[in-house]
Image: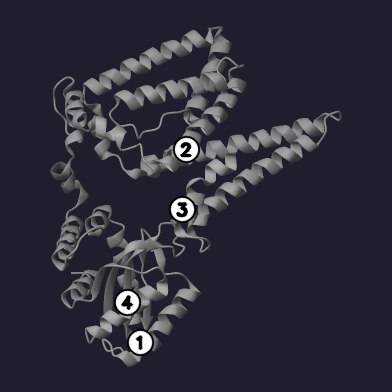
Amino acid sequence: MSTTTHFLKQALDEDTFLLDADAHTLDEVFGQVLDHLISRDVLSADQRPVILEALQKREQEVSTAIGHAVSIPHAYLEGIEKPIVFFLRLRRGVNLGAPDGIPTRYFFVLLGPPGFAAEHLDTLTGIARLMSDEEFRFEIRDVQSRKSLLDALHAYLARSATPVSQRIPEETEPDLKFTGKPFGGIRDDIRRRWPHYRDDWLRGWSTKSASAMVFLFFACLAPAVTFGGIMGVVTDQQIGVVEMLIATAAGGMVYALFSGQPLILLGGVGPLLVFTGILYDLCTDLSIPFLPMYQWIGFWTALFLFLLAVSDASVLMRYFTRFSDDIFSALMSLIFIYEAVKAIVAVFQRSFSDTSVNHDEAFLSLILALGTFMIAINLARFRRSRYLLPCMREFQADFGTTTAIA
């Protein structure tokens, strides 16, 4: 058993945990933790102000919020006889400026004698690994008893002890199992999603979804306009902004209506732009009409996708990791940055190469680009600030990109 799990089990056995506590500030969290420890005779009342001051001083140096809604306050003082781990879950998270911007809801308060600091890094690493497990966080989100917490901890230990290669055959989700029959996966998908199809749409009409809808609208609009404009340049306006907007809207609506999964976004991406540019140059060199060629490529792509769907080829996705997704996301980000910088450089080159053109256009383009970026990035970070009310910070952060573009 690791040091972390030993201390967590000790905390549960000694009743040094609180669930769904009401606290709005970090001082209130510390106060409830210390009061609970004093009521259980783990600490004396005389130690309260000293420990509280030590915890506050540590937070003033660097926030102990590590992300995933987790914070690990700690203090090591004379007078504390043995290491103490206290687990507290808030009813509503508080903003502590976590790296990922998520309000902190889970607190692991570590107290101990000065000699306990040697084991501090091992405990921190163990807690970080424990709380990075999505299944564990999901299981402890609403538990209401010590037994449920222990069950979640034991389930995590069982998952950690089993190699991933051995878990794949046993824990494969139903929608990633190979049926061995033509159209078998499609039939199973329809059978699974049909009972929830109507509910998927009805639950979306709520005020909570409003900010997400507006954000996603601009998230789809911005790349459509960006890539549409760039495609217009590389294809000599045969495919431009209007065509990209129509394709994005039509493809997105058809996919949302008939795919059974309306949360997936469809639109232009960097690799598609690169492919289209290369294809246009090839068609120009070979004197082949570009749009008919592009249409036939679409037909062949649809045929291959149909064959992959019929043969259950999508089950191979269970062997892919987040690495593929991260690499693809990084490539798209680099393409966006490259094209933006390239456009600004082109404006400056055109402005300074032609003496009849005013330089104000180039500098205005640079100011608008930098201003949009600064507004978007600062509003996105506003969730981690300490200004205004939590709901107002969330609103500003959710609509940060929308505000910057507007």
Q: Quadrant of residue 108?
A: bottom left
Disc 3 residue type (three-letter): Glu
The numbered mark, 4 or 3, whose residue comes first in the sequence reads: 4
Q: Nearer the viewer, mark 1 or mark 4?
A: 4
Residue 225 in view in this figure: yes
Q: Measured along the vertical axis of the image, is residue 14 above or below residue 142?
A: below
Q: Reading the chain from its start, which is encountered first: label 1 or label 2?
A: 1
Residue 236, x across and y down, in percent: 62, 16
Q: Element at badge 4?
A: helix
Give residue 205's position: percent from left, percent from top: 35, 37
When asked about the image quadrant of residue 391, the answer is bottom left
Q: Nearer the viewer's eye, disc 1 or disc 2?
A: 2
> Label 3 belongs to which residue?
394
Q: Are marks 4 and 2 in contact (CB under 8 Å)?
A: no
Along the line of sight, the residue nearer the viewer: 323 or 394: 394
First of labels 2, 3 by sequence position? 2
Question: Which element is circle 3 on?
Answer: helix
Rendered view: 372 above or below 10: above
Marking on residue 214: 2
Q: Give the class, few, some or many, for how many residues have Cα within 10 Å of label 3's Cα (few <14, many ≥20).
A: many
What kind of element bears circle 1?
helix
Q: Amino acid at mark 4?
A: Gln
To which residue does mark 4 refer? 32
Q: Nearer the viewer, residue 195 or 297?
A: 195
- State the separation of the CA atoms marked 1 and 4: 11 Å
Q: Which sits in the foreground, 100 or 121?
A: 100
Residue 83 at least partly seen: no
Q: CA distance from mark 2 to mark 3?
A: 14 Å
Which numbered marker is on residue 48? Answer: 1
